[in-house]
Image (cartoon, helix red, strand yellow):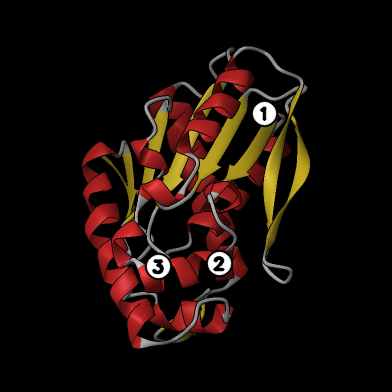
Amino acid sequence: MSTADGIVPESMFIERAERLLALLRRDFGIPRGMRTVIAVAGESGSGKSVTALDLAAVLNRDGIGTAIIHQDDYFVRPPRTNHEFREQDISSVGPQEVQMDMILRHISAFRAGAGSITCPTVNYFANRFDTRAVAFDGCELLVVEGTYVLMLDDADVRIFLEATYEDTATARRARNRDIDAPFVTRVLEIEHSIIARQIELADIVISRDYAISWR
């Protein structure tokens, strides 16, 4: 991930995941001896995917079986098609673009003891969704990451990354996945107006300078 000063070392993200794990153990009783769901949300480029992946990695390393699912895999339309749809109707931007009900069904399956699920997975190059199996056997935790996932009713711990799309412009350009155009800026502004409100739902907030606080 990039910052105004350059590239953030991978070690910084691992160290942040270590601090998150310590907080989850101390203040949230993780692991709880039952299947538990952690939601990680933030704006485009805020580092939510890296945070979720690194958190899952340190949990698994410490013997706390953890699976992860990504909201981007659950969009109604594949990326290029969704962009074209937005150009026709910008009011479509928001959580209604995502199959939130399917995410909830997959969370319910995890809580009910399912050994695995079959979920969509986005193929950016081919502009389509494929499928993949996510194994839940031996898992105590499910991490769900995405822009709107703190809005899901069924989460035990909610983590919000405070960085905005303006803060993360360099990181998004480095990722080279988003189209850099005035229309996309307008989309990000609309998303910001929706996503930023989720901070009120958060149990843990990660600030722009990677500080972690418990609300």
In front: label 1 or label 2: 2
> Which residue carries the number 2 mark?
81
Q: Which numbered mark, 3 or 1, is in the foreground of this view? A: 3
**Callout 3 secondary element:** helix
- x, y percent for residue 139: 70, 25
Depth check, front residue: 60 or 174: 174
From mark 1 to mark 2, how far is it between C-alphas? 38 Å
* Depth order, front residue of 178/156: 178
Left/right placement of residue 27 relative to residue 6 reads: left
> Can you give x and y, in whole percent of width and height, for residue 209 in the image?
34, 66
The disc, 2 or 3, on the residue closer to the chain's N-terminal end is: 2
Picture quadrant where residue 11 is located:
bottom right
Up the image or down, 70 lies above or below 12; here it is above
- Position of 16 with respect to 212 (left or right) is right
Please tell me in which quadrant of the rendered image residue 77 appears. bottom right
Vertical order, 198 against 1 (above or below): above
The label on residue 172 is none
Residue 15 visible in the picture? no
- The crowding category of the residue bearing disc 1, from other C-alpha atoms within 10 Å (few below 14, some 14 to 19, many at least 20), is some
Q: What residue is shown at x 76% (from left), y 20% (from top)?
A: 115
Query: Number of labelled discs?
Result: 3
* Amino acid type at mark 2: Thr
The quarter of the rendered structure image containing the C terminus is top left
Closer to the N terminus: mark 1 or mark 2? 1
Counting residues from the start of the chain, the first of labels 3 and 1 encountered is: 1
Mark seen at residue 86:
3
